[in-house]
Image: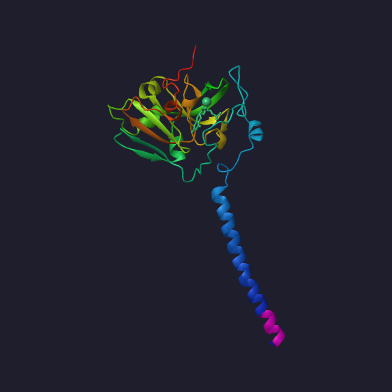
Amino acid sequence: MNKAGRAAGKGRYVNRISGKWLLLLLGLLLFGCGTSNNDNTSETDLEELAKTEVNEYEGQDLSSLTDFRENSIKGPQYIDVDVYTLTIDGLVGKPVALSYDEVLDNQKYTKAVTLHCVEGWSVDILWEGILLADLFEGVDVQASADTVIFYSEDGYSTSLPLQTIMERQLMLAYKMNGVVLPPERGFPFQLVAEDKLGYKWIKWITRIELSDDADYKGYWEQRGFDNEADVGP
Ligand SMILES: Nc1nc2c(c(=O)[nH]1)N[C@H]1C(S)=C(S)[C@@H](COP(=O)(O)O)O[C@H]1N2
Ligand SMILES: [Mo]
């Protein structure tokens, strides 16, 4: 090999090395984006999503998922479903931390229920979800538990009597109007607190605690909102 050939060969070698580094860098970049920017962890085009939603159920007109007024205490939460767990603990014999799929591995229920916000607006939505009663079956709820406290990714919390949850067969929704809840609407789970005001409809639920503190006051309840939160007649 002549001088020029050696030089050219060396050049190719250098190019190959930097090419490898470039690929590694690209890979790292893609991996980085992939973990923080998948379907559930980036902003949703709600207008686009609304084109796929159900508009009517058993003859009843439904509101749209775009009809909510976003007024959450810290704005939408973007939860990575790959690392998400729903903890159920407190006064239970067998506390659990369930993955998204494990929560969904229960009987599904569908029901049209209206959410009324204290600010005076409301939405009629077709919810699809699973019964809290079914989740509680697996954790061995202790007899002293009379209150269920829900906690969320954004630091929000609220509570309901255990009896209300069981009697009214309240559910955790994972779909609204036939589409999976977008992050802006509470992905992965929102409590369908039927007949209760909007501030009981906690979104982005991460933990459910069985408790005997019937006087527990959640985020808005601490700030003067009624703990019963019954929707007026
Ligand atoms: N985690 C969490 N859940 C929440 C809230 C919140 O700020 N954080 N706001 C509540 C209120 S006041 C209402 S009316 C309903 C619907 O709120 P949205 O229109 O902002 O979705 O979500 C409820 N759930
Ligand atoms: Mo609200």
Asked if 151 appears above or below 17 in the picture, the reply is: above
Q: Residue furthest front?
A: 223
Above or below, 87 against 25 in this view is above
- Report the side of 82 relative to 177 (left or right): left
Image-quadrant location for residue 162: top left
The residue located at (32%, 25%) in the rendering is 146
For the question of whether residue 147 can be seen, the reply is yes
Where, by quadrant of the figure, is residue 159 drawn?
top left
Give the quarter of the figure containing the N terminus.
Answer: bottom right
Question: Residue drawn 59% across and 28% down?
Answer: 69
154 part of magenta stretch: no
Q: Residue 206: image x %, image y %?
A: 44, 37
With 12 as the anchor, is 97 left or right in this view?
A: left
Q: Looking at this view, name the residue that lies furthest to the top.
A: 233
Q: Residue at x 36, y 33 (%)?
A: 209
Query: In the visual, does 103 lie left or right of 144?
Result: right
Which residue extends farthest bottom? Answer: 2
Q: Can residue 182 be seen in this snapshot?
A: no
| Viewer-closest of 134 and 225 | 225
Tell me the residue at 39%/30% (across/down): 149
Q: Quadrant of residue 165?
A: top left
Seen as rendered, the residue at the extreme right is 4
* Percent x, y of residue 199: 48, 26
Name the chief secondary structure element in magenta: helix
Range of magenta residues: 3-9
Q: In the rendered view, does 93 fall on the left or right side of 152?
A: left
For the residue pair 2 and 203, the one nearer the viewer reads as 203
Q: Residue 214: percent from the left, percent from the top?
A: 34, 24
Residue 198 at x, y = what percent? Answer: 50, 24
